Structures are given as structure tokens and as C-alpha cells.
Image (cartoon, grey):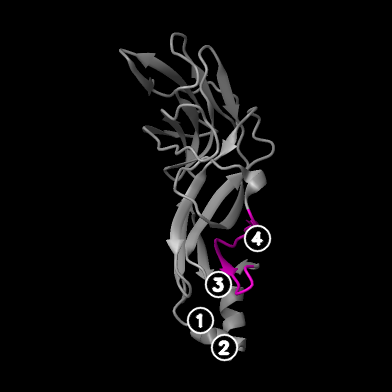
Amino acid sequence: MTQYTLRFVNNSSATRSFLCYQQDPNIGVPNVVSLAWFAKQSRPGTVVDFTWTIDYSFVWSETGVLTPGVAFIASQVVPADPKGVNKILFDYVGGAYGFEPPTTGGNPGSLTINTAAGFPPNQAAIGIGMSGAGTFAVQAYPNDNAIFTPHPQYWVAFGNYMPGQVLDITNINNPANVAFPTNVYAMVATLNSDFSWTVQPLHAANADALRSPRQTAEYAYLGAI
């Protein structure tokens, strides 16, 4: 399975979290929220690598009301495949939430979570993840279903974030889209001294470093991924 890498270079004067998250305007689930897929503190002059593969999963968390700032820490991660095992039941048995074993039979290209009867609303959230971490979530209601049709877009930001945090993407300051060109699997997102972003393939970032003596010192330790 192809591995993707996003390298964050902090050329700013601040220590905050490098955030990577996903957006998907056409995911097909009303009131869905994006989660902080990856978040890690970064000091000035440092580099952070985030790697993943495009392998999906079903996830759930006992979050309470799903509002921005709430932490979605997955209590269960079940592998899923939009082209195969793509359907699962979320229920409440013996006083505990959980997934039943996944099956085939969902809409092709989608990931379906059905919810059972008999549990109170606004206590748990369900969603999907990628590479073992949650990416999108929605409040779980009994006798409902959520059909996620993923075609993710990758975004980065810099601020005060924690892994799994429910995001309000309309209030994220200065985000940048990271679009992987065809047959490119390693990108670099550089936060510049003025807090603007430069997003480019790793090979282009290395070429720029070689052309600039000042940047060569900054990029010398980047190397190849």
C-alpha cells in the first residue's frame, strides 16, 4: 500500500501545533465535523513528519455532545473498505457502546454505519478514520444511519490543537491545502517567517534549497523520505 508523507517545516518564530486534517464537502453526511487527524507541537527551526496510507476504518467515541473543542478519542477502530467490507452496526449492549462485526452490502464506494435502537442521543459519536486515526465524525442517534462517501482533501494549519479535537473549520486561521500531484507521495508544507505557507513536492523543496545558500542550512537535514 502506498505511503504518503507530509513534512512540516517551521520557519516561523512561534511554538504551536502543526495540524493536518481532512475536508470533504461531498462526504454525504449532514452535520459531519472534521477531526484533528494529526497534531504535534513544533518549535521554530524544527521539522515534523506525518505519514499515512489510504486505509479506512470505522471509529466511535463517547464524546458527549459533539461540539468544537471536544476530544474524539476513538474507543474502537475497525478496518473498512469502501469497495468491500463497508457496513457496520453501532449498538449499546450491557451498558456499553460498541461495533458489531463489519459486513459487506453497503453502497459501493461508501462506508455505512447503522445505529441500533435503545441508547440515548448526544452521548456518543461515530465516524470514519484513515490510517488508524479519526478524520470525520457525526453525533450518533438511535435507529439512524450515516453513509460516508470519502474523497478527502488534505489541509494544514498552525495553532493550538490536540489530536482528535473536533474542529470548526470555518474558524481555522490561515489554513493551506495540500494537493498531491499525480505520482507524488511526499510533500513539504513550510510555514514562513511571516506565517504564510509554501506547499510543494519534496523534490521541489530540495531543489529550492540548493539554489538558495540561506535555505540550504535550513533544508540540509531534510534529506530524502
Q: Which amino acid type corresponds to the residue marked 4 in the rendered image?
A: Pro
Q: Quadrant of residue 206?
A: bottom right
User: Which mark sits nearer the N-terminus, 1 or 3?
Assistant: 3
Q: Is the C-beta separation of discs 3 and 4 under 8 Å?
A: no
Give me the C-alpha separation between circle 2 and circle 3.
15 Å
Q: Position of residue 30 (x, y in %)?
A: 65, 27
Give me the C-alpha separation between circle 1 and circle 3.
12 Å
Q: Is residue 182 magenta?
A: yes
Could you tell me if residue 183 is visible in this image? yes
Q: Position of residue 175 (x, y in %)?
A: 64, 56
Give me the C-alpha separation between circle 4 and circle 1.
25 Å
Give me the C-alpha separation between circle 2 and circle 1.
7 Å
User: Which mark sits nearer the N-terminus, 2 or 4?
Assistant: 4
Q: Is the C-beta separation of discs 2 and 4 under 8 Å?
A: no
Q: Which residues are magenta?
A: 173-195
Q: Which residue is mark 1?
A: 218
Q: Which amino acid type corresponds to the residue marked 2 in the rendered image?
A: Arg
Residue plotted at (40% across, 38% down): 73
Q: Quadrant of residue 118?
A: top left
Residue 181 is labelled as 4
Instruction: Say which of marks 2 and 3 sits in front.
Output: 3
